[in-house]
């Protein structure tokens, strides 16, 4: 007897809907992502990687007032920390663009402006955490320092210490269980390790001068000067990010998960950029944005709340001869956006924080979030039903694995994305990205099939959404 037709929404994992060849592709694609992730541990390193990828596809760097129409694509680099890649479509940009926007900043520890101290004969580097960090996850594990230093003479020093095998690493050494009874054990997890104790061990050899003060600190400064030509004051004009030293690894016997630092949100930035570069033909102009500062509220000149988004659109219109403000506003109103950001996958051990019918699931493809926010959708974009309808149809027609998701149970917590900052210009925006386990931890988990589903979904968006 034939199976009775039902009208239930299908809820299947990619392992039940896609064949072996598809999954082999997803593993191969994830290896390309792994290579990117391992050399892109800061937003600046992401910009460098995307610049290289764009150049390989014949993109030219956009120069305001100088660049001309006719290139295969244009690269907009903003202050070294945010980037946009644009491919012109058959339609003029004035009729609207298809935009995918992701962020490349990830939770981490930043070195303080004056970080170097000495306590108990140990030189330490003080930090100030960036974004939603669970402090205990950063203790007693190998850490690296990546970033830039602008020296007194204005020259730039790019630093990366700890990610190569031969490099030393830095460690925030947690207290041993033997001595933590009074000061840690009965404290709440948010309080047992105060932010001011998140200090990296940075050296123990003292300066030879026995009469000097802070001898270990002085000796470390000597090393920094000898090796990098740095002085203590150079830390003031620096952006040095403390990130996990380890590289991305396959997780599990079946190797179907990639564990790594910064999937939030580099997995979306990478898949969006690759989708734009590899899309076959574009009816509408496409833009992939990779912006900074999402983890601290999309603030600053390089965040999604800045003028970078609309300024880039204005430059794209200028390339096509449109320079008026009204044309820009109309183009924005006719623009469609995917806010590409990760979701919280249903955790096998903590299912009680999710509402299962509306939870993202590992291995089920792109998680489509109509809204995010917390305590009554506050801070959400909450996409129009009409627009969600178009995106749903697009994914179904293109055979993209996707499912519906909320960030968690009502009243359990929540969070926001860049979506609302683009919606403020009148654009249609919806959130869609792969689910993670352990979001914001130093070792986030993402399913390889979900990485590939994101790529396919974003590519379909650039190729097909009219
Ligand atoms: Mn994110
Ligand atoms: Mn995040």
Image (cartoon, grey):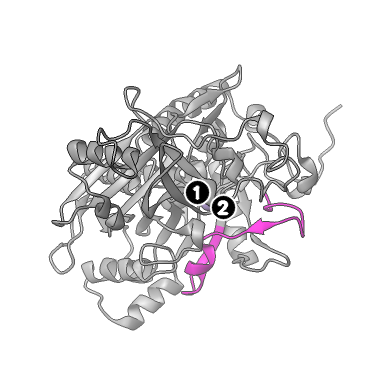
The x and y percentages for residue 16 are: 67, 28
Asked if ligand 2 lies within 8 A of label 2, the reply is yes
Q: Residue at x 33, y 68 (%)?
A: 313
The x and y percentages for residue 289 are: 38, 56
Q: Residue at x 28, y 37 (%)?
A: 219
Q: In the image as oriented, which residue stretches furthest toward the top?
A: 253
- Residue 175 location, quadrant: top right
Q: Quadrant of the N terminus?
A: top right
Tag 1–tag 2 contact (CB < 8 Å): yes
Q: Between residues 258 and 340, which one lies in front from this camera angle?
A: 258
Asked if ligand 2 lies within 8 A of label 1, the reply is yes
Q: Between residues 402 and 181, which one lies in front from this camera angle?
A: 181
Sort mark 2 into few (<14), some (14-19) or many (20+) by Cα contacts within 10 Å: some
Tell me if residue 141 comes above or below residue 128 in the rendering.
above
Q: Which residue is mark 2?
A: 132
Under circle 2, the secondary element is loop
Instruction: Tell me if residue 456 is in the magenta stretch.
Output: no
Q: Residue at x 64, y 31 (%)?
A: 17
N-term mark: 1 or 2: 1
Q: Residue at x 26, y 55 (%)?
A: 233
Does the magenta stretch mainly form a helix, a strand or a loop? loop
Describe residue 91's horizontal placement relative to residue 139 as left or right.
left
Describe residue 79's horizontal placement relative to residue 397 as left or right.
left
Q: CA distance from mark 1 to mark 2?
A: 6 Å
The x and y percentages for residue 96 are: 39, 67
Under circle 1, the secondary element is loop
The x and y percentages for residue 221 are: 26, 42
Q: Which residue is mark 1?
A: 107
Give the magenta part as a residue range.
405-430
């Amino acid at each position: 007897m034939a199976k009775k037709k039902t009208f239930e929404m299908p809820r299947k994992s990619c392992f039940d809907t896609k064949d072996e060849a598809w999954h082999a592709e997803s593993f191969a694609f994830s290896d390309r992502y792994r290579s990117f992730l391992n050399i892109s541990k800061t937003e600046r390193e992401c910009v460098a990687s995307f610049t290289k990828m764009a150049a390989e596809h014949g993109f030219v760097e956009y120069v305001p007032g100088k660049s001309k129409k006719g290139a295969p694509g244009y690269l907009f680099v903003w202050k070294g920390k945010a980037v946009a890649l644009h491919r012109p479509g058959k339609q003029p940009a004035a009729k609207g663009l298809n935009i995918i926007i992701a962020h490349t900043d990830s939770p981490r520890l930043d070195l303080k402006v004056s970080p170097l101290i000495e306590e108990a004969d140990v030189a330490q580097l003080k930090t100030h955490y960036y974004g939603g960090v669970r402090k205990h996850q950063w203790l007693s594990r190998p850490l690296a320092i990546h970033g830039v230093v602008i020296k007194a003479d204005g020259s730039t020093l790019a630093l990366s210490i700890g990610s190569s095998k031969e490099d030393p690493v830095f460690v925030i050494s947690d207290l041993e269980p033997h001595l933590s009874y009074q000061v840690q054990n009965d404290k709440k997890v948010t309080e047992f390790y105060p932010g001011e104790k998140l200090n990296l061990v940075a050296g123990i050899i003292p300066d030879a001068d026995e009469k000097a003060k802070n001898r270990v600190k002085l000796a470390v400064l000597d090393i920094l000067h000898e090796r990098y030509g740095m002085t203590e004051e150079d830390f003031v004009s620096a952006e040095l990010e403390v990130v996990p030293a380890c590289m991305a690894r396959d997780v599990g016997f079946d190797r179907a998960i990639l564990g790594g630092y910064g999937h939030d949100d580099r997995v979306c930035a990478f898949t969006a950029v690759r989708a734009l570069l590899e899309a076959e033909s574009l009816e509408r102009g496409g833009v992939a944005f990779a912006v900074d500062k999402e983890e601290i509220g999309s603030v600053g000149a390089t965040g999604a709340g800045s003028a970078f988004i609309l300024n880039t659109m204005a430059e794209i219109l200028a390339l096509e001869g449109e320079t008026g403000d009204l044309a820009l506003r109309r183009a924005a109103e006719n623009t469609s956006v995917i806010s590409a950001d990760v979701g919280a996958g249903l955790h096998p051990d903590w299912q009680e924080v999710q509402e299962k019918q509306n939870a993202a699931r590992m291995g089920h493809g792109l998680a489509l979030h109509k809204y995010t926010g917390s305590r009554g959708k506050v801070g959400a974009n909450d996409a129009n039903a009409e627009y969600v309808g178009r995106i749903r149809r697009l994914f179904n027609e293109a055979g993209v694995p996707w499912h519906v998701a909320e960030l968690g149970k009502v009243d359990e917590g929540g969070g926001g994305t860049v979506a609302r900052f683009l919606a403020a210009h009148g654009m249609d925006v919806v959130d869609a990205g792969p689910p993670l386990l352990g979001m914001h931890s130093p070792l986030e988990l993402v399913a390889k099939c979900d990485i590939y589903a994101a790529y396919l979904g974003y590519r379909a968006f650039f190729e097909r959404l009219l």
